Image (spheres, rainbow, N blue to C red):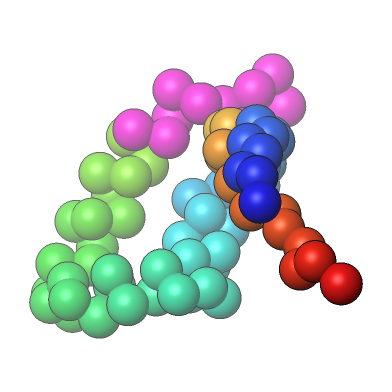
Amino acid sequence: MRTVTRRVPVVYGDVADWQRFPMSTGQRAMWSFVPQEEHAALVARAEEILGGARDASGRISVWQDMRYTLGSSAP
């Protein structure tokens, strides 16, 4: 077995795209712990933070480390 890490670029058109991504993964559980009345403030804070990751076209461009664990069974 071995583990390989690759850094890949992830690009979002805007903060709404960024927010939709975790809702399509297991990360959506995080949102379930945030009270509904706090969602707007959380998204506003994310917009502030992600604003620094905008590229020349205005898209949000961040890096994600992907980890793959690979193995095989002996015949």
Q: Is residue 10 left or right of residue 24?
A: right
- Residue at point 34% right, 33% down? 49
The segment highlighted magenta reads 49-61
Counting every numbered tag in the picture gives 0
Quadrant of image for the C terminus? bottom right
Residue 11 x, y percent position in the rendering: 67, 41
Q: Is residue 50 magenta?
A: yes
Residue 47 seen by the camera: yes
Residue 12 x, y percent position in the rendering: 63, 47
Using the rendered view, name the quadrant where residue 57 is placed.
Answer: top right
Q: Is residue 37 left or right of residue 53?
A: left
Q: Is residue 41 above or below residue 51?
A: below
In terms of depth relative to the viewer, which is nearer, 18 or 69? 69
| Extreme residue toward the top, this view | 56
Q: Is residue 5 magenta?
A: no
Residue 37 x, y percent position in the rendering: 13, 75
Residue 58 seen by the camera: no
Using the rendered view, name the quadrant where residue 27 is placed.
Answer: bottom left
Q: Is residue 17 above or below residue 4?
A: below
- Residue at point 62% right, 43% down? 3
- Residue at point 37% right, 42% down? 47
| Extreme residue toward the front, this view | 75
- Residue at point 32% right, 77% down? 29
Q: Is residue 51 above or below residue 44?
A: above
Q: Is residue 12 left or right of residue 45?
A: right
Q: Is residue 17 above or below residue 44?
A: below
In terms of depth relative to the viewer, which is nearer, 30 or 35? 30
In terms of depth relative to the viewer, which is nearer, 30 or 56? 30
